[in-house]
Amino acid sequence: MNSSAADRRLSTLVRHLVGTVNNESSIISSSPTSAGDSVFANVVRAPEDPILGVTVAYNKDPSPVKLNLGVGAYRTEEGKPLVLNVVRKAEQLLVNDRSRVKEYLPIVGLADFNKLSAKLLLGADSPAIQGNLVTTVQCLSGTGSLRVGAEFLARNYHQRTIYIPNPTWGNHTKIFTLAGLNVKSYRYYDPVTRGLNIQGLLEDLGSAPSGAIVLLHACAHNPTGVDPTIQQWEQIRRLIRSKSLLPFFDSAYQGFASGSLDGDAQSVRMFVGDGGECFIAQSYAKNMGLYGERVGALSIVCRTADVASRVESQLKLVIRPMYSNPPIHGASIVATVLKDRNLFHEWTLELKAMADRIITMRQQLFDALRARGTPGDWSHIIKQIGMFTFTGLNSKQVTFMTKEYHIYMTSDGRISMAGLSSRTVPHLADAIHAAVTTLT
Ligand code: PLA
């Protein structure tokens, strides 16, 4: 890194830290105030994470009717976490294979996993894969893939501005800022229509500086559940290419939105299909239920095989001092499922069942609000896509629902539909009805 890049990185880091603590002096003062005090006596308590902190609050609540719709984690109709059958089978195969060892993986991770992940994302017949234009490295789930990609860009790309949608997953700003990028936003969601603000999006990206990076949600936009149509994706693609912007996809929900792995990869494939460069961060947290295994991949599609291999050599320089090499177990599960025809087929069925259950929950919640005559148009609940509904409830209403009904959700009014079940829909509908009719 040259010295101006290092300076920039340091100053973004300081800005970030100052933003997360209340008292600027606390980050520099390390001397004890009196004998016996901790050298950390001045450390200020940081706020809980806006998403994962919801689970912390939920865990403390003794109420038997409490419901956690904060974090996007799939639950069964019985409200229990789900380990997919194919995952159990794959793990059994791994355990039974005595030839398997626990040696370090290479810096870029498990080779089979990387190849199969690129195929899953770009399609088995992808010319980019066949031409060796894609470098794929195993990373720590979606978050780690985004971070590695961003650090690579901060070191190796001429433009350090990244445009993210407004709103977006809360961690995006922090990931990119701490990697050394300048974060700006583009208009995405229109609260009035509860749909995509395509005009605003095209205007904002149209006035972005040439070469700027653009973060796109591949499908099931978090938190809004609003995705561009295929025609709109085509408009976005043309604009991005005509301005030489660099697309960086966050693919955290492939298969989870529509139930079809290929269907949910269409946006990414449109961009890769035109031969231009493209970054994709992939996560198996949701679609294979491997949340805590931290399995994901970063793929970078380049214009030539030679560039792709040089890019990979630089990715290794990013990864090695960060965590050296990735964990072996989760990636082995994924590779086992993806390379076996029967397991793969079984996975697609289990994935479809999860996606379908979420869609059923949307319908049930919509019907329950209609039955209660809850004021407002709730059709967005059935129109939105993926794991979340962006309800439109304000933070006061959210606080009310948590206090009075023990329903936990993020303060922006996002609810995880995957955390609902037929049993809990009436309770949620009662809470929304009460919140809307008593508070505006
Ligand atoms: N990208 C998006 C758009 C996400 O919604 C999430 C997870 C990730 C990346 C990262 O997932 P991973 O690192 O676990 O692969 N978002 C969750 C969880 C589901 C979280 O906030 O960490 C959410 O509740 O929004």
Image (tube, helix red, strand yellow):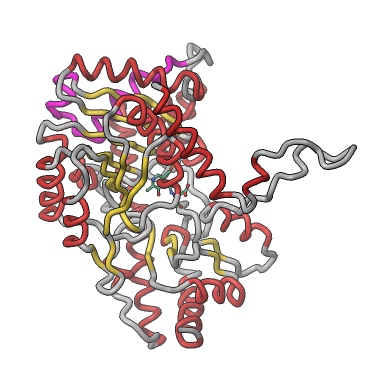
Q: Is residue 289 left or right of residue 128?
A: right
Q: Quadrant of residue 8?
A: top left
Q: Quadrant of residue 383?
A: bottom left
Residue at image position (51%, 64%) is 409
Q: Is-magenta flag for residue 107?
A: yes
| Position of 291 relative to 3 (above/below) | below
Question: Which of 213/126 is in front?
Answer: 213
Residue at image position (40%, 28%) is 5
Which percent across, then down, holds residue 143?
43, 39
Q: Quadrant of residue 422?
A: bottom left
Which percent across, then down, holds residue 303?
15, 24
Q: Which residues are magenta?
A: 105-132
Which percent across, then down, holds residue 297?
36, 31
| Position of 29 relative to 437 (above/below) | above
Q: Residue furthest right?
A: 35
How many marks the image carries: the answer is 0
Which percent across, then down, holds residue 209?
21, 43
Q: Is-magenta flag for residue 396?
A: no
Quadrant the N terminus occupies: top left
Q: Is residue 83 left or right of residue 122?
A: right
| Position of 40 relative to 312 (above/below) | below
Q: Is residue 178 left or right of residue 336?
A: right
Q: Is residue 310 left or right of residue 127?
A: right
Question: Which of 210/400 is in front?
Answer: 210
Quadrant the C terminus occupies: bottom left
| Position of 187 relative to 378 (above/below) | above
Question: Which of 131/344 is in front?
Answer: 131
Residue at image position (42%, 47%) is 173
